Amino acid sequence: MMPMQSRIPVVAAWISALQLLTSACSTTPAADAPEPPLPGYPSDQKLIPFTVSELSGNRFYVDQESLDVDPDRDVRLTVVVDAPGGARTVTHEAIRCQTAEFKILAIGRRDRQWTALADPQWRRIEEGGPNRQRAALALEYLCDGPTSVLDRDAALRALRASPRTKSFQKP
């Protein structure tokens, strides 16, 4: 049996190696790079409808011109939500499939201009309720488990195809 004092360097080396290994294998993305410039404001002719829920009276769209998959495979897109009463919400967002998170980068105004958020934060995508548009986008169109579509064309194909039913909830 090794004396206690001779075990300390071995244990310390083992802990250091384990920390290095876990940091190298981490699925958490590196610190966020600066956001790319905002896209042009969406035009109705370039909106692709997508299904969120049979229960929602809202209509949901993605602006095809805004869709982008960055090198870290975060998906950036403009989401338009039309309510039955005529209200429209326009947001430019990012979805991170790897961690099931989203962040709102900018909010559309009535004058068809963007108001960029000063410090957008990643938030967990929640599934539930009739207005689960981010969960629908992630689960049914843009993510395959923890990875996103490979590029803009793949994202467009997925949005134009019929939706699949998936869930964040474990069976």
Image (spheres, helix red, strand yellow):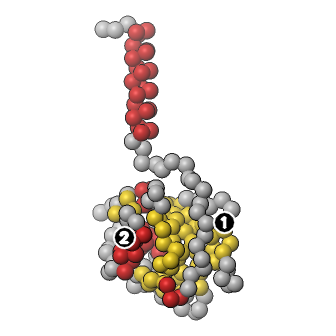
Residue at the image point whose x is 39% and y is 72% from the top: 153
Residue sitting at x 48%, y 61%:
70
Q: Marks 1 and 2, how far apart in space?
A: 28 Å
Identity, as a three-letter code, of the amino acid under mark 1: Leu
Q: Nearer the viewer, mark 1 or mark 2?
A: 2
Q: Provide the secondary structure element on which disc 1 rests.
A: loop
Q: Give residue 11's quadrant in the image.
A: top left
Disc 2 residue crowd, few under 14, some 14–19, many 20+, Cα 10 Å: some
- Please name the amino acid that badge 2 sits on: Ala
Q: Which residue is mark 2?
A: 154
> Mark 2 falls on what kind of element?
helix
Residue 72: horizontal and vertical position, in percent? 46, 55
68 or 59, nearer to the observer: 68
The quadrant of the image that shows the N terminus is: top left
Confirm whether residue 141 shows in the render: no
> Looking at the rendering, which quadrant does residue 87 occupy?
bottom right
Circle on res. 64: none
At a point 47% along the width and 78% down the height, the residue shown is: 64
The C terminus, quarter of image: bottom left
Residue 159 percent across, percent down from the top left: 39, 77
- Where residue 21 appears, as percent x and y from the top left, is 39, 35
Compared to residue 58, the image places residue 126 above or below, namely: above
Residue 45 in view here? yes
Classify 10 Å Cα crowding around label 1: few (below 14), some (14-19), many (20 and above).
few
Q: Residue at x 39, y 13 (%)?
A: 7
Does 54 appear above or below 146?
below
- 66 in relation to 14, above or below: below
Residue tagged 1: 117
